[in-house]
Image: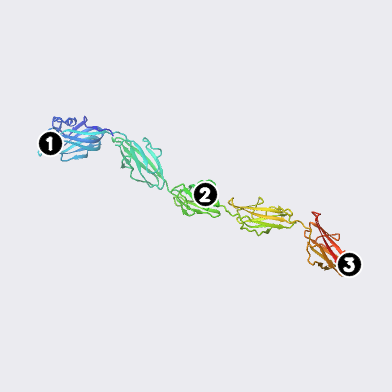
């Protein structure tokens, strides 16, 4: 604020009248000498000073003639200061500061008013009962000239952002607010503190917020009118505030999960995601963020505030579906996002294991089961059929992947040697494994017989010992004196690998030999079983037939 100065001295002055030579100009010449006074021969009168422009009046005062030695009863008694802010040619006087019952020689009053003309209005001059005189030595006012600056220094909103950025010379602005914003306040700050402001025609102090302004959906016009201190200039700043309609936006702007990674990466438009967690993860949380903060979100039916973590969601082994439902602020538009979370199984057990389709009684509860199996010599290969308890497990038989419940590729077996077969089950989690071992021993070929029958005609001949054993090589038999010959029927353990001769004649396994003639009282019949693959292997049986 400028320093106040005397704004009446040297200005144009007039009065309701005066007594010569005590003209009105003597009241504003700054002198308090007895002769330098204004005198009007009426107890009711006025003294007017044309300030020649608009001023801010901060103080005014009167020096009465008691200051020059007259009795205090000669001082002005009832008077007031009046101001004009209209045309000086047609003034409209406004009472601003009345003084009643004064007896003091000097009067100094503090005010804060604007004026382009001042008037000292005297209702009663001196206090003497019969006097009709009013006289003063001096009338003065302190103040400073007012500017024509009607610009704002700043303009802010309680919600939304001005566009463009505020500039004093820019008069038009726009701003957008959410539908949830039902009212707004405006805070204008003037460059000149003596300027006055109205917001939508209601006075607002510089730097203070206006009263709340109600906003309709759509465009709302707010006017900020600044009147310069000298009242000569006005500037009107206009703000068009658009209150958005009720949003139909049901999009998420982000979606995260506490374990694993969403696939594909999140976008608002994509509503389907997958995630894989470790088998040790039994719960997850989801953090959804709505594109419109006024939207409501439910995760698996439970309300979750935008940008906050959901309650813990339990995960079963296998596939788990998590739904995130978003309802737009309009209460009608909805959108569902789905996350399929796979919690892999740690189950690496088999429910069955078969070799050449024959189930094995494996102790499945053992951490590393081992089963020993023997097969016949003519079994040259074996297949293993494992069936997993969890269909998502991976099975390898001797390193080769085998589908659960399907036979492995044939595994070659070596005669007389145990062939180890490893069945490794890897659980769905990719880390848990269990190994099943099957040792398959292929028996060596033998040239032993499993049966030997001797007949005389159609009648069987009893052998001694009576029960045949492949390991017993000598037998005897007794026939009647009239029997001239017998036949022999040998059966080999491995008929495809041996050749059999009876008394020198080739006989197929299970076949009947030509009749062997009995000579004398006792006849030895030789049955020779020889391996085809290894001719050095042979077994000879002898049957002695006695008449």
Q: Please give the residue where the numbered disc 2 appears in the rendered image.
A: 259
Q: Please give the residue where the numbered disc 3 appears in the rendered image.
A: 521
Q: On residue 3, which mark appears?
A: none
Q: Please give the residue where the numbered disc 1 appears in the rendered image.
A: 74
Q: Against 474, is 399 above or below?
A: above
Q: In this view, does 10 lie to the left or right of 442?
A: left
Q: Residues within 10 Å of mark 3 (few under 14, many from 20)?
A: few
Q: In this view, does 176 lie to the left or right of 282?
A: left
Closer to viewer: mark 1 or mark 2? 2
Q: Where the C terminus falls, by quadrant?
A: bottom right
Residue 242: where, in percent of width, then height?
40, 44
| Nearest to the observer: residue 76 or residue 517 | 517
**Disc 3 and disc 2: Cα gap in Å?**
96 Å
Question: In which quarter of the view is residue 83 placed?
Answer: top left
**Disc 1 and disc 3: Cα gap in Å?**
193 Å
Q: Against 484, is 276 above or below?
A: above
Q: How crowded is mark 1: few (under 14 residues within 10 Å), some or many (20 or more)?
A: many
* Mark 1–mark 3 CB contact (< 8 Å): no
Number of marks in the image? Answer: 3
């Amino acid at each position: 604020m400028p320093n106040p100065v005397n704004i009446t001295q040297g200005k144009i002055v007039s009065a309701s009248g005066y007594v010569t030579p005590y003209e009105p100009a003597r009241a504003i010449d700054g002198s308090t000498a007895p002769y330098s006074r204004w005198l009007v021969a009426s107890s009711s009168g006025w003294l007017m000073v044309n300030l020649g422009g608009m001023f801010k009046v901060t103080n005014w005062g009167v020096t009465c003639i008691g200051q020059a030695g007259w009795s205090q009863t000669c001082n002005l008694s009832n008077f007031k200061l009046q101001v004009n802010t209209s045309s000086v040619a047609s003034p409209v006087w406004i009472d601003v500061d009345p003084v009643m019952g004064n007896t003091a020689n000097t009067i100094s009053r503090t005010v804060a008013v604007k004026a382009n003309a001042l008037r000292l209005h005297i209702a009663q001059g001196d206090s003497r009962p019969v006097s009709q005189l009013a006289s003063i030595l001096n009338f003065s006012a302190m103040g400073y000239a007012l500017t024509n600056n009607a610009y704002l220094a700043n303009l802010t909103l309680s919600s939304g952002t001005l566009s463009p950025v505020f500039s004093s010379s820019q008069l038009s602005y726009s701003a957008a607010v959410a539908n949830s914003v039902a009212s707004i306040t405006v805070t204008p700050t003037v460059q000149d503190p003596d300027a006055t402001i109205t917001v939508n025609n209601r006075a607002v102090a510089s730097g203070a917020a206006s009263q709340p302004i109600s906003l309709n959906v759509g465009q709302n016009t707010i006017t900020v009118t600044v009147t310069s201190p000298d009242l000569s200039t006005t500037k009107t700043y206009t703000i068009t505030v658009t209150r958005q309609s009720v949003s139909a936006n049901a999009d998420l702007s982000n979606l995260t999960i506490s374990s694993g990674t969403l696939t594909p990466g999140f976008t608002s438009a994509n509503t389907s995601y997958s995630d894989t967690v470790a088998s040790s993860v039994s719960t997850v949380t989801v953090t959804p963020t709505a594109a419109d903060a006024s939207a409501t979100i439910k995760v698996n039916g439970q309300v979750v505030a935008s940008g906050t973590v959901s309650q813990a969601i339990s995960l079963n082994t296998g596939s788990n579906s998590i739904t995130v439902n978003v309802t737009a602020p309009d209460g009608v538009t909805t959108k569902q996002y789905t996350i399929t979370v796979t919690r892999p199984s740690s189950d690496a057990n088999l429910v069955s294991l078969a070799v050449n389709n024959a189930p094995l009684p494996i102790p499945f509860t053992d951490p590393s089961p081992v089963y020993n199996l023997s097969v016949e010599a003519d079994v040259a290969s074996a297949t293993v059929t494992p069936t997993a308890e969890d269909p998502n497990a991976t099975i390898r038989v001797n390193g080769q992947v085998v589908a659960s419940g399907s036979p492995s590729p044939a595994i070659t077996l070596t005669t007389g040697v145990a062939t180890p077969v490893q069945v490794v089950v890897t659980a769905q989690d990719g880390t848990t494994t269990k190994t099943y071992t099957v040792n398959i021993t292929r028996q060596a070929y033998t040239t032993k017989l499993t049966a030997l029958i001797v007949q005389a005609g159609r009648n069987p001949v009893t052998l001694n010992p009576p029960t045949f054993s492949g390991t017993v090589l000598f037998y005897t038999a007794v026939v009647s004196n009239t029997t001239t010959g017998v036949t022999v029927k040998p059966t080999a353990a491995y008929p495809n690998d041996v050749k059999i001769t009876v008394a020198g004649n080739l006989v197929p396994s299970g076949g009947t030999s030509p009749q062997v003639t009995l000579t004398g009282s006792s006849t030895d019949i030789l049955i020779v079983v020889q391996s085809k693959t290894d001719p050095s292997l042979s077994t000879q049986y002898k049957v002695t037939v006695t008449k």
